Image (cartoon, grey):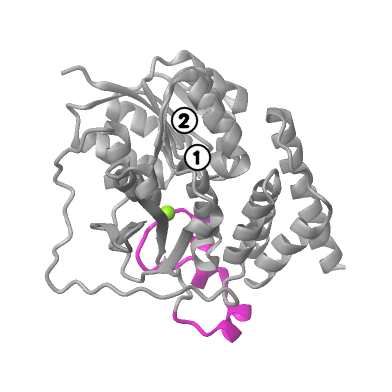
């Protein structure tokens, strides 16, 4: 059987490492034709020799080793253009993943998407481009992967709503009044998933779920009022679909990112693997309504989505600035939603999205404004 050629962006991050472990598990299915890392040169080189990959990019630092042919953002985009990958797995964290996604689509490669920001920043534009190029966007995020598998079993008219589950993050059981004084170290302890720093903080604030609501809106063409969020501490139910008759259909399995990665890379097939599975004996499932006052990042995401245009992009940009400031100890945990809310309210952000330039300009403007609000606070 011919192996599928894949290019992995963000190969040294949490998603990239999981993806390579999927490749190692299913060697007969995949051939890695390129790897890109932001700064971790030594791990990149180690991965390259382990998987026999010669096309390598380091986008955020100057490579010391001459085996790394592509450097900087330009280099990364060239790598995407020049590899003959059939599918690109975008595991880059944050807004930095946007242009690589666009380039993958423009060069006719299917996109296994773990980078939420691609759709949050410019969902309509990205999906229109994918349609034009005839490429598939395959969600890797566990919630969207679950919904993606479920929705295709029904007629579109049969679906009432999609329900995203949230673990509730590190502070699920902490009273709201104590959130003010939590430290970055505490916030980095996620109860069920082991992930990168930014996404772990976003899980604790539910900003991650907010971004996922926006992502679901684009992927499944659902209006905000038909996208629901429930707190599900066990993380076994990856997400649900509600049909018109009031029934819920759930995808239930082991919380292991490698499984949605495998499903995205092999879509539409489903493959067996030896990465373990959930045993249903003694499994308890519980669900709670999220507390919007404890987690303002969730209602703020719905607001941004309803306003449309560049508002979701501004939400994301301000959140990136806020999380960075929290990790550096400049603002308390509760300062994250404050900064995002103030940035969203700062001015009338454009509600029409016209072209990539506008996406990038608005993104950098939102960041400068969020930074300016931060420095006012420090004075
Ligand atoms: Mg997720």
> Does the magenta run of residues contain 189?
yes
Residue marked by disc 2? 36
Name the side, left or right, on which 198 lies relative to 277. Answer: right
How far apart, in angstroms, are the residues tagged by discs 2 and 1?
A: 9 Å
Q: Quadrant of the C terminus?
A: bottom right
- Relative to 141, does residue 289 appear above or below in the rendering? below
In this figure, which residue is indicated by the disc labeled 1?
Answer: 92
Callout 2 crowding tier (Cα within 10 Å): few <14, some 14–19, many ≥20: many
Tag on residue 240? none
**Residue found at x 20% / y 17%:** 2
Q: Is residue 146 left or right of residue 40?
A: left
**Are the residues tagged 2 and 1 within 8 Å (C-beta)?**
yes
Residue 231, above or below 181: above
Of residue 287 and residue 280, the one placed in the foreground of this image is 287
Query: As drawn, is 27 to the left or to the right of 240?
Result: left
What is the span of residues highlighted in magenta in the rendered image? Answer: 173-201
> Label 1's element?
loop
Q: In the image, 122: left or right of 209?
A: right
* Image quarter of residue 177: bottom right
Q: Residue 65 at what x, y percent from top left?
A: 48, 24
Residue in the picture at 50% in, 26% down: 130
Which residue is at 36% across, 60% downward? 193
Percent coordinates x, y for residue 317 in the rendering: 67, 49
Where is residue 154 shown, x and y percent of the image? 30, 45
Residue 190 shown in magenta: yes
Ligand 1 picture quarter: bottom left
Q: In the figure, 153 relative to 80: above or below? A: below
Residue 75 in view in this figure: yes
Using the image as rendered, state which of residue 106 and residue 15 is in the foreground.
106
The numbered mark, 2 or 1, whose residue comes first in the sequence reads 2
């Amino acid at each position: 059987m011919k192996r599928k050629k894949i290019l992995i962006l963000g190969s040294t991050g949490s998603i990239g490492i999981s993806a390579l472990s999927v490749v190692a598990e299913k060697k007969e299915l995949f051939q890695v034709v390129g790897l890109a890392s932001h700064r971790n040169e030594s791990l990149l080189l180690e991965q390259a020799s382990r998987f026999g990959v010669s096309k390598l990019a380091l986008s955020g630092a100057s490579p010391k080793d001459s085996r790394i042919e592509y450097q900087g953002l330009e280099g990364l985009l060239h790598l995407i253009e020049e590899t003959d990958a059939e599918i690109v797995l975008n595991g880059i964290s944050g807004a930095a993943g946007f242009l690589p996604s666009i380039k993958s689509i423009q060069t006719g490669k299917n996109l296994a998407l773990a980078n939420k920001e691609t759709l949050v920043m410019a969902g309509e534009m990205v999906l229109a481009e994918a349609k034009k190029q005839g490429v598939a966007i395959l969600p890797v995020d566990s919630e969207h992967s679950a919904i993606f598998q479920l929705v295709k079993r029904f007629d579109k008219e049969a679906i009432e709503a999609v329900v995203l589950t949230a673990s509730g993050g590190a502070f699920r059981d902490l009273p709201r009044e104590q959130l003010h004084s939590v430290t970055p170290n505490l916030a980095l302890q996620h109860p069920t998933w082991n992930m990168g720093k930014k996404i772990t903080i976003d899980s604790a604030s539910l900003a991650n779920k907010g971004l996922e609501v926006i992502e679901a809106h684009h992927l499944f063409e659902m209006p905000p009022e038909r996208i629901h969020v429930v707190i599900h501490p066990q993380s076994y139910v990856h997400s649900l679909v509600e049909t018109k008759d009031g029934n819920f259909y759930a995808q239930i399995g082991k919380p292991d990112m490698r499984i949605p990665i495998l499903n995205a890379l092999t879509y539409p097939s489903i493959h067996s693997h030896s990465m373990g599975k959930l045993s249903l004996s003694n499994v308890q499932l519980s669900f709670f309504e999220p507390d919007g006052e404890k987690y303002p990042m969730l209602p703020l995401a719905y607001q941004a989505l309803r306003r449309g245009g560049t508002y979701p992009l501004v939400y994301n940009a301000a959140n990136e600035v806020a999380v960075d400031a929290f990790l550096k100890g400049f603002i308390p945990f509760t300062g994250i939603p404050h900064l995002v809310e103030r940035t969203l309210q700062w001015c009338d952000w454009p509600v029409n999205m016209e072209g990539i330039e506008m996406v990038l300009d608005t993104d950098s403007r939102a960041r400068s404004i969020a930074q300016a609000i931060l420095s006012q606070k420090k004075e």
